[in-house]
Amino acid sequence: MRWEDYKTIEFEDVAGGIRICRLNRPERLNAVNPWMHRELSTLGRDLQEDDSVKVVILTGAGRAFCAGGDQKPNPNEAPPSRGPASEVRWREAEEIVRGIIELEKPIISAVNGPAMGLGATIALLCDVVIMAKSARIADSHATVGLVAGDGGASIWPLLCGINKAKEFLMLGTHIYADRALEVGLASYVYEDAELQEKALEHARMFLRMPTYAMRATKATVNRLLRQSADLTLEAGLTYEAISAKDPDRVEGTAAFTERREPNFTSRMGTWGDRG
């Protein structure tokens, strides 16, 4: 995709080859609608192919990093069809995760506010995760009746350990910046007003490094990420697709939009009998 064709992500170039990618739906807390989902699926590849880009900073416009999936997307804002919607979304979900993993260039997430669901996944997949002190992160799929299937299971266990990851993902726990730093989800925490400048400082550190040594080191470590994605991503997307048809998903979404406690009917039921 050409840079000028992006509608929900804006770009700013900083001297030396730093590209700031800013999720840009601030009126919806940068929630991921179908357009943004499509654009996130091509972003990693486009950044890789642009030789002018040396280091990437990923952040959000306004007061959020990314609120996760948009629960009320405007049907008039859908991108051109590329096939059956469920198949396209599945393919794009894989491309989002693998696009970040396969990006050879350093990528820093500057988490300026809430990073939820898919927003948490893309933030945590980055090489360096810096958070504003007031920011929080969560993969809250389960709280609305969905399986955390779009990459969270691939990255959370590698950062905070299997047991903590299971707890955080199964409960949809909101983790504020200082706690995220403590458990290994964040690399650094800064005062809110300092975040963007600190992100640039980190980016400039990478600019001073020898390109091949740095990128090959990243590629070596990212073999673990590829292996994790190979093990979990397809299964997670499959379970998420099944859970999307579950009555608890309908109730979870309704409760979320109506700002009330959900009344799930399958609490502690047998998950293997579903679907």
Image (cartoon, rainbow, N blue to C red):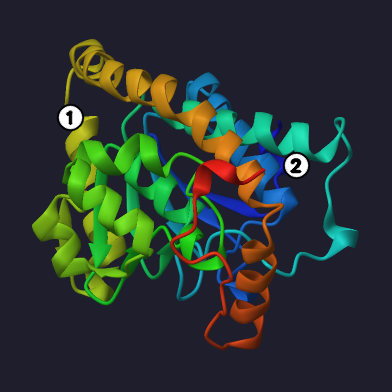
* Count of numbered circles on the image: 2
Compared across the picture, whether 110 is left or right of 269 comes to left
Instruction: Report the residue that reaches farthest toward the left.
Output: 182
Q: Earlier in the sequence, mark 1 or mark 2?
A: 2
> Up-down: is 273 above or below 8?
above
116 on left or right of 207: right
Q: Where in the figure is residue 46, as x and y percent of width and height? A: 58, 27
Q: Which quadrant of the figure contains the N terminus?
A: top right
Inspect this view and state whether residue 99 appears. no
Figure check: 16 above or below 72? above
User: How far from the left and from the top, in percent, is residue 248?
Assistant: 62, 65
Residue position for label 1: 208
Q: Would residue 121 be visible to someone looking at this image?
A: yes
Q: Residue at x 43, y 45 (%)?
A: 122
Q: Position of residue 100 (x, y in %)?
A: 44, 31
Which numbered disc, 1 or 2, marks the residue closer to the eye? Answer: 2
Residue 68 sits above or below residue 242 on the image: below
Question: Residue 5 bears which disc, if any?
Answer: 2
Query: Could you tell me the amino acid type at mark 1?
Result: Arg
